[in-house]
Each structure stands twice: as C-alpha cells, then as structure tokens.
Amino acid sequence: MALPSFSPCKQIEQLIAEHRPVAGTQLVLAYSGGVDSEVLAYGLAEFAQLHPEYRYLLVHVHHGLSDNAAMWQTHCVTRAKQYQLPIVVKRVQVDSGPRVSIEAAARDARYSALQSVMEPGDILLTAHHQDDQLETLLLALKRGLGPKGLAAMGTIQGLGKHFWLVRPLLDIQREQIETFANAQALAHIEDESNADSRFDRNFLRLHVIPQLKSRWPAIAATTSRSAQLCADQQALIDEEVGARLPAMLVNLPHRVFPVLDLKLLAAQRPLWRAQLLRGFIESQGHAMPSVVQLQQALSQLLDAKPDAKVEIRFQATLLRRFRHYLYLSEYQPRCNVALSNLMVDITTLPLADVATRVQIDPQRQLQFFIASQGVRVRMPMPGETVSVRFAVPGSLRCHPHMRDKGRELKKLWQEFDVPPWERDSVPLLYFNERIVAAIGYWVERKFVAASDQMGLDIQLK
C-alpha cells in the first residue's frame, strides 16, 4: 500500500499560519543532518523563498560524542549553503558519569544551545515525527506518567517563558519522510549511535515498534490520537487548577512569590490536592516532582504537627512549611562565607537621588537613598560607624517604629511571619553597636528621622 505523499514546506506553512508570528520573527531549525531534519531543512528553504518577512537560522549542535561529529558538521554547513540559509554551529559538553542518562544530558545540552541563539518570540522548529511520538508515549508508560506525560509532544508548544516550539512533521510517518528524502535525492547523515539498543529510544525503534507496526500498522496514528486526548484532559485539569489555586495563595509582605495556604489545600478532596500542589510548584517555575515524591510531600506537609519543621527537597526545589504556609525556593548549598560586620563608608552615602550600593552576598545588594518622606533612618552622626550585620542573638531587644513597646528579636521574627530559615539572612543596620533597622521590616524608633529632616531609605535588591 502506497504511503500518502506530503510537502514539508506546506507542513511548515500550515503551523506558522496557525501561530501567526509577526514579521521579523526568527524561525530556528534544530538541524542535525539526519534524514528527518534534512527533509525539514529542505522544506524550510522552500518556505523561506515564499516568506521573506521572517528571519531564518539553522543550528547544528556538535555534541562531541562521535568520531564522525566533525564530518556531520561539515555536511550541515555545506547543505545550509545549498539551501541558502544561515547556519551556526554550537559545541556543547555533555555531562556523563554514574546515574547520568547520556540521552537526557545530550537533550538538555542541545536545547540549552538552541535557546542561546534565540530571542524572545522566536520559533524553534524540530523534526519530530509520528514514530517519535509513539516512542515518547511508550517511554511515558514505562515511567508511569499521568495525563500530562501521556500527552507526549504537541505540534505547537511554549518553550520556556520566551520561545515557541513547532513540530511540523508530527503527523508524518517515518516511512513517508524517508520516501520523500529518496525522491528528492537528499543526502543526509547516519548517526551510528542510532543502532545502539542500550539507549531506550533506540531499543523501542529497533526492536519494539517494528513488531507493533507489523501487527497493527496504524498504531503510530492511533496512539497519537490517544496522546491528543490526554492533552485535552490535561488542559481541562489545568483550567480547573487555574480557577481554584489563586484563592489558596497568600501574598505575604517582603516576599516576591506568594505562599500556599496548607489549611485550604487540606480542605480539598484528596485527588485535587495533588493537582493543586503540582499547579503551585509549576506556577513558580520549578521542575515537577514524581508521583511518589508528590504523595510523600503531601503526607508530610498536611499531616505534620503545626509546630513541626518540615523541609523537603527534590532535585533543585526546596519545599518548607512554616505555620500553615508552604514556601518554595531553589535549593542552594549553605554558604560558609561570613556575612556579618560589613562596613559602610559613610562618605559614599548619597547626597542626591542616586543610590549608594553595598553588595552583601553574590545575589543581593543594599541600596541607600536620601529621602525626605516616609519612615526613614536618620543620617549617621560624625564618629558613628555604619555596618550591616546578620544572625544576631534572638535575645536582642528591639523597638520597631510601628510598635508602642519593644520586644525580643526572636519574638519579632515570629510577629512579622519571617520563616526561621530566612532570619539569619535579614540584613540589620547598625550605628556603632546599636541596631538601627531590620532592613525591609522596620526602623528602630529612636533612629527614625524627624519629619523635617532628610534621612536614609534603604532597600534590599
């Protein structure tokens, strides 16, 4: 039975018309030189002749994993000239070692290299086809993924926060692509690693999918429909999560991102708790945990005693509970650099509306402004040394400007809902040996500038 013919140019045209990019948008093709990307490059060259309003770029990623990598690079550069399309070659270092998937590491390095040459709004074209979709679905089943994982790949998807990913060949069979390449006499490379069945995708491609197709010839098409149904169901779940989640988020003072109210989460039906927690994690840009990790996290977060210290880490994400709120942050190894007694040269303090900056750690700095309004610190007097300190004893008695009476520092941290793990990193301003302000929280009452005086407005950036 003859396979239906197709035009890679028309496949591109259909999806680009659906996406409607503005003139000047750059279309970037992930160009390996294999038969799939060769056919797509051929189609993109034809499309570019018809649509000069866009910019075009082929990107060949040199992984350095094969002795033939230099030859593949030469092939791609030569073919790009024939297609009259610009090309860049990006060399990457692929992580390797125990418990590291070379496939996953190479993919991560590849996408990082591709995005490094893209601008916000650019479109990345990849040559994934129907058989790739089947492989992805089978791997998702092997991993025990839910609807989101089983949705596999989409024809048009967001890539990070700034780019788009378009797969024009996703409904085209591998055999159709090879037939097209032969008909057009397209030279392409053959990656010898594709014959190594130690890699999961190659095992499926070489040993499993041919058997499946011999029994059920249409299995790639039917599983693609299943993937689309899963994507539709996931879209409904995401929509419902988007409707429910905002009511459970709390914007606390001095925080960039909201926290999740665990009391409200616990009031939800069990099946929705996991979905809402996933939605909260995803909304703050963190990687998704596994099903097992998510269930363990829910159990610890919701079943712990109110005063229990709960801290859960998976990959680079840290989940912490304080009172009945869930805080998310990126895991960072503890810094051993002392942060206390950072001296501020008062001769450099601003005389106009220009900030004096003091770096307090690699990620943060203090900015000192002269101010005549609002709660502000009085100017230091001659002979007063100015310093920034951290992690002072909790027994220190402080008197915030908005309180009638003073209180111990450890009690104030609780009053201001400062989580325990953040307290030692709050910068404290000192004049000589007296605390002047907890920056971002309060000014000591005795050090507030008078209404008719200029003072210091100190901001943490």
Image: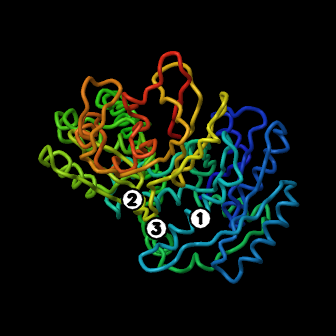
Check whether the beta carbons of the residues at disc 1 and disc 3 lie within 8 A of each other. no
Which of the two labelled residues, at mark 1 and mark 3, occupies the earlier sequence position? 1
SS type, badge 1: helix
Q: Residue at x 30, y 36 (%)?
A: 398
Q: Is residue 303 above or below residue 108?
A: above
As drawn, the residue found furthest toward the top would be: 452
Check whether the beta carbons of the residues at disc 2 and disc 1 lie within 8 A of each other. no
Q: Is residue 117 above or below residue 263?
A: below
Q: Amino acid at mark 2?
A: Ala
Q: Residue at x 31, y 59 (%)?
A: 144
Q: Nearer the viewer, residue 300 or 442?
A: 442
SS type, badge 2: helix
Q: CA distance from mark 2 to mark 1?
A: 21 Å
Q: Position of residue 58 (x, y in %)?
A: 76, 56
Q: CA distance from mark 1 to mark 3?
A: 27 Å
Position of 387 with respect to 433 (left or right) is right
Q: Position of residue 145 (x, y in %)?
A: 34, 55
Q: Quadrant of the N terminus?
A: bottom right
Residue 206 seen in the current view: yes
Find disc 3 in the rendering and name its residue: 209
Tell me how many marks there are. Answer: 3
Check whether the beta carbons of the residues at disc 2 and disc 3 lie within 8 A of each other. no
Q: Is residue 335 above or below residue 426?
A: below
SS type, badge 3: helix
Find disc 1 in the rendering and name its residue: 109
Which of the two labelled residues, at mark 2 and mark 3, occupies the earlier sequence position? 2
Q: Nearer the viewer, residue 189 or 68?
A: 68
How many residues crowd around disc 1 within 10 Å: few (fewer than 14), some, or many (20 or more)? Answer: some
How many residues crowd around disc 3 within 10 Å: few (fewer than 14), some, or many (20 or more)? Answer: many
Find disc 2 in the rendering and name its residue: 140
